[in-house]
């Protein structure tokens, strides 16, 4: 089931693409009548920051999900962040409840421009960016491009090195192996958490992660995104290395890896070395979905860094 969110905020991204952002509230002070993505009124957004996560917060945080993700995947993180920060998560183009134009641009430049638009239109600057995987790459590319908008950065399980053509072929084969449509969400959870050939050991959190990006159709359950589009999105970064952009990130940056994730320890430490103000954190017993696998350990890894940023401010 989708996590409950509070306020939908509409953003106009690059090329006029309509993007949905979601502002979270601290659960200790949230209104029980708060809505979720299926019931919130887009016109109820509060771009001046006086609503769910508004006045009185240390700063704003923008959370950027990874490929195939959505804003609701950040709900656990955003809830505790909202106690001290204005916490906003963005459904990026092609994902969640944002537009998925069949002939739209799914380039790196478009994703960076979309995040830039969200920060400016919602009045979040100077913002702390927290990105997972693809969202982390978008975050550091934006931080390099617009240092005036970004106070700090958290990179979660994203490599700076090129992944290559073989990786892209593996993803194409994996997408083709999905047994869609699924008969039920129980089947979704079971396949992605246990039966998927990419799963080395049963991982219930992974099953839940994918259950959140499924929608019911006439013939069963399928993803809310186009797998063809996701391959196109991934094609725009897997063949290139991104070290140069990383070196141009001037703000304090925390590189976080799951012990069993996709970012190796040696590469993570090299990323920290390349970053002018880099720091390192590791979450044990976590895979690629660090914040979703181990939410308490994830919080313990990033909260001291965020507290330090707030103290500086």
Image (spheres, grey):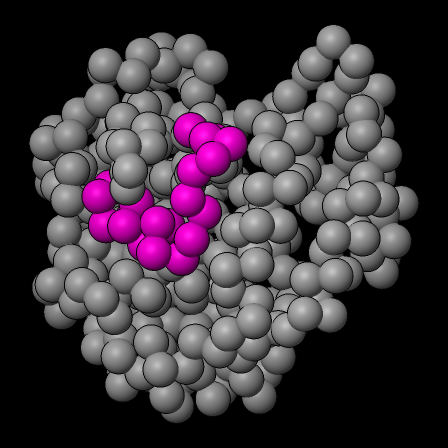
x then y, percent, for residue 164: 64, 73
Position above or below: 122 against 247: above
Q: Which of 100/105 is in front?
A: 105
Q: Which of 35/216 is in front?
A: 216
Position above or below: 102 against 39: below
| Rendered residue at 60%/55% (across/down) | 289
Whether residue 294 can be seen here = no
Position above or below: 59 against 90: below
Q: How many marks?
A: 0
Whether residue 148 can be seen here = yes
Quadrant in the rendering for residue 290: bottom right
**Magenta-highlighted residues:** 99-118
| Rendered residue at 59%/45% (across/down) | 230
x then y, percent, for residue 28: 34, 30
x then y, percent, for residue 294: 60, 55
213 left or right, relative to 233: right
108 left or right, relative to 121: right
| Rendered residue at 27%/85% (across/down) | 276
x then y, percent, for residue 140: 34, 66
| Rendered residue at 61%/35% (across/down) | 226
Q: Is residue 113 magenta?
A: yes
71 left or right, relative to 291: left
Position above or below: 32 against 243: above
Q: Which of 220/272 is in front?
A: 220
Q: Quadrant of the C terminus?
A: bottom left
Quadrant in the rendering for residue 168: bottom right
Q: Is residue 93 magenta?
A: no
Q: Quadrant of the N terminus?
A: top right
Q: Which of 208/311 is in front?
A: 208
Quadrant in the rendering for residue 105: top left
């Amino acid at each position: 089931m989708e996590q409950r969110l509070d306020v939908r905020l509409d953003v106009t991204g690059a090329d006029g693409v309509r993007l949905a952002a979601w502002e979270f509230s601290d659960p200790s002070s949230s209104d029980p009548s708060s809505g979720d993505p299926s019931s919130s009124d887009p016109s109820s957004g509060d771009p001046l920051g006086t609503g769910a996560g508004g006045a009185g917060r240390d700063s704003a945080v923008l959370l950027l999900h990874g490929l195939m993700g959505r804003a609701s995947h950040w709900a656990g993180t955003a809830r505790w962040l909202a106690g001290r920060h204005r916490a906003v998560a963005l459904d990026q183009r092609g994902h969640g409840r944002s537009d998925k134009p069949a002939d739209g641009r799914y380039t790196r430049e478009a994703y960076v421009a979309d995040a830039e638009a969200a920060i400016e239109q919602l009045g979040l600057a100077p913002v702390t960016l927290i990105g997972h995987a693809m969202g982390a790459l978008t975050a550091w590319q934006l931080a390099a491009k617009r240092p005036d908008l970004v106070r700090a950065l958290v990179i979660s399980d994203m490599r700076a090195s090129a992944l290559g053509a073989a990786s892209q072929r593996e993803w194409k084969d994996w997408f083709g192996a999905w047994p869609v449509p699924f008969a039920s969400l129980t089947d979704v959870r079971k396949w992605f958490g246990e039966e998927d050939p990419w799963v080395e050991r049963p991982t219930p959190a992974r099953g839940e992660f994918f259950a959140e990006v499924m929608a019911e159709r006439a013939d069963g359950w399928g993803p809310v995104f186009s797998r063809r589009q996701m391959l196109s999105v991934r094609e725009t970064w897997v063949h290139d290395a991104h070290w140069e952009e990383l070196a141009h990130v001037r703000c304090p940056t925390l590189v976080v890896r799951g012990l069993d994730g996709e970012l190796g320890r040696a590469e993570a430490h090299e990323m920290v070395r390349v970053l002018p103000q880099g720091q390192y954190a590791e979450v044990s017993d976590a895979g690629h979905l660090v914040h979703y696998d181990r939410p308490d350990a994830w919080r313990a890894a990033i909260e001291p860094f965020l507290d330090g940023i707030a103290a500086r401010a």
